[in-house]
């Protein structure tokens, strides 16, 4: 087919409908863009909520027994059976004990920050820690003791204790440079040089290595059985209602602050899913509008198409001419929508970086997959529509 | 390619033809390649129906039509398209031009299908038929006579073994009719093709080898 024939057939197929073609392509572009942006929103939130830092909040929480009027004063620790039962609960990936120190621990600090205080020490297995800083660990005979301080505990010092006692407030960095003299097991016990090596968001006390607690409990409180009053749990979804109602039934209390993040994640998931459904519907409507434009174009040109068939132009040939008209428009709509998605993701990546969050600067596989699938579905739809309108 | 009609009776004429004799309908008729056939009959007797059946536009009939060895009723879209663009050409009674296109574009649509007739030749034909200065005009602005000449040139702008014509000169005066007939005869001779002219009255425009009364 010569260029002049292409031009003539395109003229017969309605070159005067350029404004309609532009409008239909614009509607298609809006639909695809909304779809891709909704996938971007869902994907970015998923990354933010399931990221390493956020994962600590979302999937780990500490469980204790509710202290009530009825059980106060009695033994509220967890037995080995209860621990085994928790580990077997559906939705629980792992569970470990928070081992308390059964001996007194007294810390003193000289210099500008002169103070002395009792310290609530406890430990958990390293796999339950939200941070394992360099130098974490302890072996019998070692005088240096690394400690992890709860961020909320440190806030209490900075905002409550220090101003009231006339002590200087400390940044986290400066706190790591201080050396605490730690006396454990009373005056006749052991003395250690304790260094703050990091801060924990997950636990509310002062953590020391598990080996230190086990050793010191044996040394300074051999007669007391170390039964845990708190259990740390790694769950697939801490906000899962079944899991929570089970724990409530058993009278266990859950760290509500940690759960809030998980619930927020659930709400965001629902919001993004809803926006995704709306975007999908809008895309389907825009695809329908585009398809109707094709149908209208071909219906208008039906008389010309019939005469072209009579003159010896095959249905296959005429369909190919129509495909050459509509597929570039579809491709343009997709290309511009992808360009918008690229720009938005690049902007989101930059904005996240400013807030110390980690987001990619390019859209990930879900966006490409949805774009590819939508493209294939639309192409198939247009192919079938054209085939039905130009029958052999 | 010869055309074979085997007992063809169009459904629209079935009732009227019962008991009456016809040189075409309801009998075996073979039109050998290269023959020059005049189908002469008054209005309403099925001339246009015959031309449309032979061109594959009308399949509402009983009997069989063979294009060479190809059974028309079972021919695929591709075969029919190929037949219409390379083997059988037609000049419609009602012209069937695209009114939104110019005369040149109407002819070009046919010529470019096979690109076997040079553009210059088409221009010469237009000059001979007196429409050279109308080639860029929209067909809808041309007179019936001019449209008929465009339709004739379009019918000649492709290779063919048969040229089917349905009252092709109905809007032409004697001078233009003669000029068009000469051009058609030349083109048919060049191709070694056959031709079938359906018309109301007998004429001596072509050296007919067969005259059929409906």
Image (spheres, coloured by chain):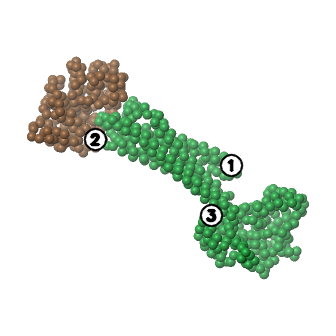
* Chain letter of the residue beneath label 3 in the structure image: A
The residues bearing labels 2 and 3 have C-alpha atoms spaced at a distance of 68 Å
- Residue A216, percent from left and from top: 79, 74
Q: Are marks 1 and 2 on the same chain?
A: no
* Residue, disc 2: B79
**In the picture, which chain is brown?**
B
* Chain letter of the residue beneath label 2 in the structure image: B
* Residue, disc 3: A239
| Frontmost residue, B64 versus A115 | A115
Mark 1 and mark 3 lie on one chain; the one further toward the N terminus is 3
- One can see residue A45 in this view: yes
- Residue B66, percent from left and from top: 20, 41
The residues bearing labels 1 and 2 have C-alpha atoms spaced at a distance of 65 Å
Q: CB of mark 1 within 8 Å of CB of mark 2?
A: no
Q: Is residue A183 left or right of residue A99?
A: right
Is A337 rendered above or below residue A134?
A: above
Q: Residue at x 74, y 62 (%)?
A: A200
Q: Residue at x 29, y 31 (%)?
A: B96
Q: Is residue A219 left or right of residue A321?
A: right
């Amino acid at each position: 087919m010569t260029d002049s024939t292409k031009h003539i057939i395109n003229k017969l197929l309605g070159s005067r409908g350029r404004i309609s073609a532009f409008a239909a392509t614009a509607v298609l572009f809006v639909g695809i863009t909304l779809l891709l942006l909704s996938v971007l929103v869902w994907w970015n939130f998923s990354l933010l909520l399931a990221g390493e830092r956020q994962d600590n909040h979302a999937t780990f929480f500490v469980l204790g027994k509710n202290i009530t009027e009825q059980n106060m004063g009695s033994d509220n620790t967890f037995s080995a059976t209860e621990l085994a039962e928790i580990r077997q609960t559906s939705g629980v990936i792992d569970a470990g004990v928070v081992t308390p120190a059964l001996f007194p621990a007294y810390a003193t600090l000289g210099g500008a920050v002169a103070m002395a205080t009792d310290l609530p020490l406890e430990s958990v297995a390293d796999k339950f820690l939200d941070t394992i800083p360099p130098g974490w660990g302890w072996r019998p005979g070692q005088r240096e003791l690394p400690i992890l301080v709860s961020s909320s505990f440190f806030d209490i010092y900075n905002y409550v204790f220090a101003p009231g006692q006339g002590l200087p407030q400390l940044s986290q960095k400066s706190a790591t440079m201080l050396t605490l003299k730690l006396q454990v097991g009373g005056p006749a016990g052991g003395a250690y040089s304790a260094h703050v090596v990091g801060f924990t968001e997950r636990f509310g006390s002062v953590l020391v290595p598990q080996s230190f607690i086990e050793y010191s409990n044996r040394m300074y409180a051999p007669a007391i059985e170390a039964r845990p009053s708190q259990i740390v749990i790694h769950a697939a979804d801490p906000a899962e209602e079944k899991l929570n109602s089970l724990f409530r039934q058993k009278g266990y209390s859950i760290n509500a602050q940690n759960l809030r993040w998980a619930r927020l994640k659930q709400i965001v998931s629902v919001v993004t899913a809803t926006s995704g459904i709306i975007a999908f519907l809008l895309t389907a409507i825009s695809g329908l509008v585009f398809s109707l434009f094709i149908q209208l174009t071909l219906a208008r040109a039906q008389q010309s198409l019939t005469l072209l068939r009579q003159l010896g132009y095959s249905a296959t040939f005429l369909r190919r001419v129509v495909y050459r008209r509509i597929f570039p428009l579809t491709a343009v709509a997709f290309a511009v929508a992808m360009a918008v998605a690229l720009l938005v993701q690049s902007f989101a990546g930059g904005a996240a970086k400013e807030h110390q969050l980690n987001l990619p600067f390019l859209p990930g596989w879900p966006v490409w997959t949805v774009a590819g699938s939508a493209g294939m579905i639309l192409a198939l739809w247009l192919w079938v529509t054209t085939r039905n309108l130009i029958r052999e | 390619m010869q055309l074979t009609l085997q007992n063809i009776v169009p459904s629209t004429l079935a009732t009227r033809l019962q008991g009456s004799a016809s040189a075409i309908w309801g009998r075996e008729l073979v039109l050998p390649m290269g023959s020059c056939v005049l189908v002469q009959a008054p209005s309403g007797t099925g001339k246009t129906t015959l031309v449309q059946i032979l061109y594959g536009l009308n399949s509402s009939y009983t009997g069989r039509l063979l294009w060479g060895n190809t059974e028309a009723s079972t021919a695929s879209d591709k075969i029919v398209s190929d037949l219409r663009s390379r083997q059988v050409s037609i000049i419609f009674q009602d012209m069937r031009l695209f009114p939104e296109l110019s005369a040149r574009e109407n002819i070009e649509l046919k010529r470019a299908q096979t690109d076997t007739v040079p553009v210059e030749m088409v221009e010469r034909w237009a000059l001979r038929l007196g429409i050279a200065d109308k080639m860029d005009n929209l067909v809808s602005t041309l007179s019936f006579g001019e449209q008929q000449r465009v339709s004739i040139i379009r019918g000649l702008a492709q290779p063919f073994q048969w040229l089917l014509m349905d009252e092709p000169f109905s809007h032409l005066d004697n001078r233009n009719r003669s000029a068009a007939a000469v051009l058609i005869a030349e083109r048919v001779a060049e191709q070694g093709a056959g031709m079938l002219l359906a018309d109301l009255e007998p004429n001596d425009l072509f050296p007919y080898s067969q005259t059929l009364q409906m």
